[in-house]
Image (cartoon, helix red, strand yellow):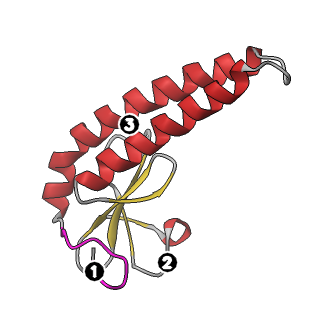
Amino acid sequence: MSADGRTQKRFTLVEAQQLLPSIRGLTEEAVAETEQLSNDLRRLAATDPARAATVEALEAVVAAWTEQVRGLGLDVKGLWLVDFDNGEGYYCWKYPETAVLHFHGYDEGFAGRMKIV
């Protein structure tokens, strides 16, 4: 990681699109796990001792997903939100989008993303 917190890996749009099936697969698995755990959590009474373990399991799934995605040289900007650094800003993808279709500068963030033409 560079001194300003950005990853050192740079991606072209083609590279980002080629990596997306792997990212989508990791994300789909994590989403399915978190949905199941969230359903389990909703069924537990507030005083049920199993709640703490279920919350820990939820946090572990998200942490593992984050670690896997970062291990590929990507920036995780939120839950199921991934940025591919291109040296001038980021190609931006959020689950369940089917392709990398957006870009934003380093300072704009998700709210400032623009559709790639």
Quadrant showing the C terminus: bottom left
**Would you name the residue on which mark 2 appears?**
108
Estimate the x, y position of residue 12 in percent, counting from the top left. Answer: 15, 65
**Would you name the residue on which mark 3 appears?**
27
| Mark 2 / mark 3, whichever is N-terminal | 3
Who's the residue at 19% across and 47% down the image? 19
Residue 51 lies in what quarter of the image?
top right
Q: Is residue 8 visible?
A: yes
**Would you name the residue on which mark 1 appears?**
2
Estimate the x, y position of residue 45 in percent, counting from the top left. Answer: 83, 18
Q: Is residue 33 left or right of residue 43?
A: left
Q: Name which residue type carries label 1.
A: Ser
Who's the residue at 33% across and 69% down the image? 90
Q: Nearer the viewer, residue 61 or 13?
A: 61
| Mark 2 / mark 1, whichever is N-terminal | 1
Estimate the x, y position of residue 15 in percent, counting from the top left. Answer: 14, 56
Q: Is residue 117 visible?
A: no
Q: What stretch of residues is rendered in magenta?
A: 2-10
Nearer mark to the viewer, of 1 and 3? 1
Q: Are marks 2 and 3 in contact (CB under 8 Å)?
A: no
Q: Name which residue type carries label 3.
A: Thr
SS class, disc 1: loop
Q: Is residue 111 left or right of residue 3?
A: right
Most distant residue in the front direction: 49
